[in-house]
Image (cartoon, grey):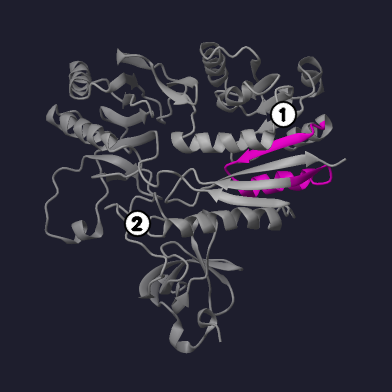
């Protein structure tokens, strides 16, 4: 009998008391990786078990945390056997901060399960079997690959169980780090992070310690009081850095003392910014950002192109792997110089500009006006004359009148947000009837849903997953569709 399905009274019992609805299953063998990076196993009654802290191959005792008709959610509370695919996690915060959930899994296995999830979605949700599935593109850097990090200040840092149960007196609760999953008001005080260039750790730690020296008040999210609210760090492969400190209450002269200290300690910071934001939320898109020193942007290179990135710009978070992704898009597009291209959800126009040299013309569409303005400016600086960019809601702007005005494209690139494309956009793509569509997605489930709506008109010729975020379960996928004649 399969070990994971073996059942007896000894490996199934209820926890009495306030949590009597929780169950414990012992010696469960984890079989797969599933949605949101959770491990997948089977409970003795046949229901699916989603386990938040195990990997395929582990044999564990679990306690359920949620029960539904078809599944349980659970946490492993004892490990009887470790998977052969386990590796040591290098981060001291692993398992607490909520990021890098697969850091304890061999990287090649991460790629395997990411690719498997993509193909499972295409088949199960979309009823799609691509004619060719190319190998997933692994990332050149498995750590230190992000070019943007956002941290929160808090006067109420998260305390570990060991700290709470100890006799230690904790008189300094200031923290600068990440939100604890499920706790909007608790911040993990970071000692080290392996996601961005190590210089980011130096800058973050310097700012925290200098702020405390100056007696600046860290934000209290419940009371909505304090000086320091958030910190954003951006960097590029050209070695440029942006630092943006968001204040809640204006600390007056202390603000300039902190910013001056950062400028003197880190000459590589090309863009030193600040904002005073007393809204209920800390989003920046409606805020006026002030330049303390340097420029209001940093520059990134992609091949022969240069892109200016400001504090509000969207840019692929993994700069090196973005080139790999865009090369796949270029290959699938099959441009020879004579085709017209629509780039839907163009953002700041990076894909459009990357393809422009091999196209007759490119038209990008995006709903965010700041992004379109950045696309136009970057295209001008890159001396690209055959690309145009338009702002508008995709389902309203991209219609037959727009197409009649700007031309019938030979190739369409679409890279929608996680929710995928609105049905009216899918209908318009079908009506347009471009010979080729390249669909880039950060959510293969919604991608599969959209492809199902198109499969009577288009066949999926190729599919290739791209790992933009090592140590996490997130994965991008690119498919090539060709019109059925």
Q: Position of residue 397 (x, y in %)?
A: 72, 22
Query: The magenta stretch spans which residues?
Result: 433-460
Give the residue at x 74% y 33%. Answer: 425
- Number of marks present in the image shown: 2
Q: Position of residue 225 (x, y in %)?
A: 28, 31
- Residue 416 seen anywhere in this rendered image of the structure: no
User: From what the image shows, is residue 311 above or below residue 482?
Assistant: above
Callout 2: few (<14), some (14-19), or many (20+) C-alpha neighbours within 10 Å?
some
Residue placed under numbered mark 1 in the picture: 395
Q: Position of residue 23 (x, y in %)?
A: 46, 75
Q: Earlier in the sequence, mark 2 or mark 1?
A: 2
Quarter of the image that includes the C terminus = top right
CA gap, disc 2 to disc 1? 41 Å
Residue placed under numbered mark 2 in the picture: 95
In reply to whether residue 192 is colored magenta, the answer given is no
Question: Is disc 1 placed on a helix, strand or loop?
Answer: helix
Give the residue at x 70% y 56%. Answer: 123
């Amino acid at each position: 009998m399969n070990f994971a399905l073996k059942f007896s009274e000894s490996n199934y019992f209820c926890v009495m008391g306030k949590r009597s609805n929780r169950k414990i299953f012992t010696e469960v063998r984890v079989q797969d990786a599933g949605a949101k990076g959770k491990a997948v196993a089977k409970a003795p009654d046949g229901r699916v078990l989603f386990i938040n802290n195990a990997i395929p191959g582990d044999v564990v005792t679990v306690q359920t945390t949620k029960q539904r008709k078809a599944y349980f959610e659970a946490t492993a509370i004892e490990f009887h056997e470790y998977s052969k695919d386990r590796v040591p996690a290098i981060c001291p915060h692993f398992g607490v901060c909520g990021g890098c959930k697969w850091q304890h899994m061999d990287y090649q296995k991460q790629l395997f399960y990411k690719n498997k999830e993509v193909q499972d979605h295409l088949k199960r949700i979309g009823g799609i079997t691509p004619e060719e599935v190319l190998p997933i593109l692994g990332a050149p850097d498995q750590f230190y690959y992000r070019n943007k990090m956002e941290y929160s200040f808090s006067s109420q840092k998260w305390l570990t169980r060991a700290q709470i149960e100890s006799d230690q007196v904790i008189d300094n609760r200031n923290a600068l780090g990440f939100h604890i999953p499920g706790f909007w008001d608790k911040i993990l005080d970071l000692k080290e992070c392996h996601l961005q260039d190590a210089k980011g750790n130096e800058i973050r730690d310097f700012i925290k310690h200098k702020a405390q020296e100056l007696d600046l008040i860290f934000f209290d999210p419940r009371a909505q009081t304090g000086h320091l609210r958030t910190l954003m760090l951006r960097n590029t492969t050209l070695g440029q850095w942006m630092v943006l400190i968001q204040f809640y209450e204006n600390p007056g002269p202390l603000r300039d003392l902190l910013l001056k200290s950062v400028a003197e300690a880190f000459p590589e910071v090309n863009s030193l910014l600040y904002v005073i934001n007393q809204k209920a939320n800390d989003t920046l898109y409606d805020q006026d950002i002030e330049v303390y020193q340097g420029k209001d942007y940093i520059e990134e290179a992609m091949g022969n192109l240069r892109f200016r990135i400001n504090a509000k710009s969207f840019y692929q978070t993994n700069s090196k792997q973005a080139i790999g992704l865009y090369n796949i898009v270029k290959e699938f597009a099959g441009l020879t110089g004579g085709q017209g291209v629509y780039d839907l959800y163009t953002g700041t126009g990076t894909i459009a500009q990357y393809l422009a040299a091999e196209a007759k013309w490119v038209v990008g569409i995006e709903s965010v006006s700041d992004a379109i303005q950045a696309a136009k400016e970057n295209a001008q600086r890159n001396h690209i004359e055959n690309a145009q960019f338009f702002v508008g809601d995709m389902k309203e702007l991209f219609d037959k009148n727009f197409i009649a005005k700007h031309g019938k494209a030979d190739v369409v690139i679409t890279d929608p947000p996680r929710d995928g494309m609105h049905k009216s956009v899918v209908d318009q793509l079908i009506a347009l009837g471009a010979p080729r569509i390249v669909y880039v997605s950060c959510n293969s489930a919604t991608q599969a849903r959209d492809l199902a709506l198109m499969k009577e008109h288009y066949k999926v010729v190729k599919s290739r997953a791209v790992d933009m975020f090592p140590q996490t379960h997130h994965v991008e996928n690119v498919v090539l569709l060709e019109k059925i004649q």
